[in-house]
Amino acid sequence: MSKPGPKPFYHEGIRFECQGSGKCCTSRGSYGFVYLTGADVKRFAEHFSLSPAQFKKQYCGSKDGRVFLIDPPEARGDCIFLENGNRCGAYEARPEQCRTWPFWPENMKAKTWRREIASYCPGVGKGRLHTREEIEAILDSQEEN
Ligand code: SF4
């Protein structure tokens, strides 16, 4: 069921299908962090045959209780797992933040969506229609994490 209140700009749904551009995996100003939930760390650790502690030691930093993928100088602001500028080197284990792109709470304001997200991400407007209900379920799932 949709949330009560005024209709959001996406009330008729939004088409989105990843085009493999890697744009959401590269740094753009303040959007430079890939944050990880506990489940993400566990999934990544299994993917790399490491313990969660080993994975965190090798690939993570933390601040204010939030764990994120490190960004070594050689990655030049791109995700540490991005290969050839457009391919996720750990796609099957990619974290929640990557799975829920572009439906992030901070993206879902009409102006931000049109000016930044839609003009930046080539997957917007392509592929399957994501209904308002689906989008809101994705947004809610992030609030729970
Ligand atoms: S984990 Fe993979 S999908 Fe997520 S930002 Fe890094 S390269 Fe992109």
Image: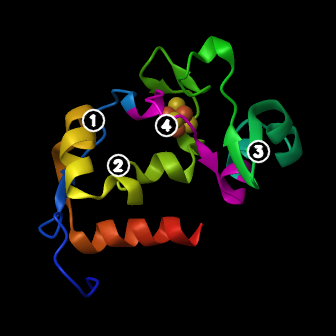
Q: CA distance from mark 1 to mark 3?
A: 28 Å
Query: What SS does tag 3 mark?
Result: strand
Magenta segment range?
Answer: 24-42
Q: Nearer the viewer, residue 71 or 1?
A: 71
Q: CA distance from mark 3 to mark 4?
A: 16 Å
- Relative to 37, is 141 above or below? below
Q: Is residue 75 above or below residue 4?
A: above
Q: Residues within 10 Å of mark 2 (few under 14, many from 20)?
A: many
Q: Residues within 10 Å of mark 4 (few under 14, many from 20)?
A: few
Provide the residue designation for mark 1.
121
The residue labelled by disc 4 is: 30
Q: Is residue 144 left or right of residue 119?
A: right
* Contact flag, marks 1 and 3 (Cβ < 8 Å): no
Disc 2 marks which residue? 102
* Label whose residue precedes the other's in the sequence (4 or 1): 4
Q: Which residue type carries mark 4? A: Ser
Cα separation, mark 4 vs mark 2, equals: 16 Å
Image location of residue 21, percent across then percent down? 33, 27
Whether the residues at callouts 2 and 3 have beta carbons within 8 Å, the answer is no
For discs 1 and 3, the disc positioned in front in the rendered view: 3
Say left or right for 93 vs 25. Answer: right
Disc 3 marks which residue? 62
Q: Nearer the viewer, residue 144 or 16?
A: 144
Tag 4 or tag 3, which sits nearer the N-term? 4
Mark 1 Cα shell of 10 Å, populated few (<14), some (14-19), many (≥20): many
Q: Is mark 2 within 8 Å of ligand 1?
A: no
Disc 1 residue type (three-letter): Cys
Which of disc 3 and disc 2 is earlier in sequence? 3
Quote the CA–CA distance across marks 2 and 3. 24 Å
Residue 76 percent across, percent down from the top left: 57, 15
Residues under numbered marks 4 and 2 in contact, where contact means CB atoms less than 8 Å apart: no
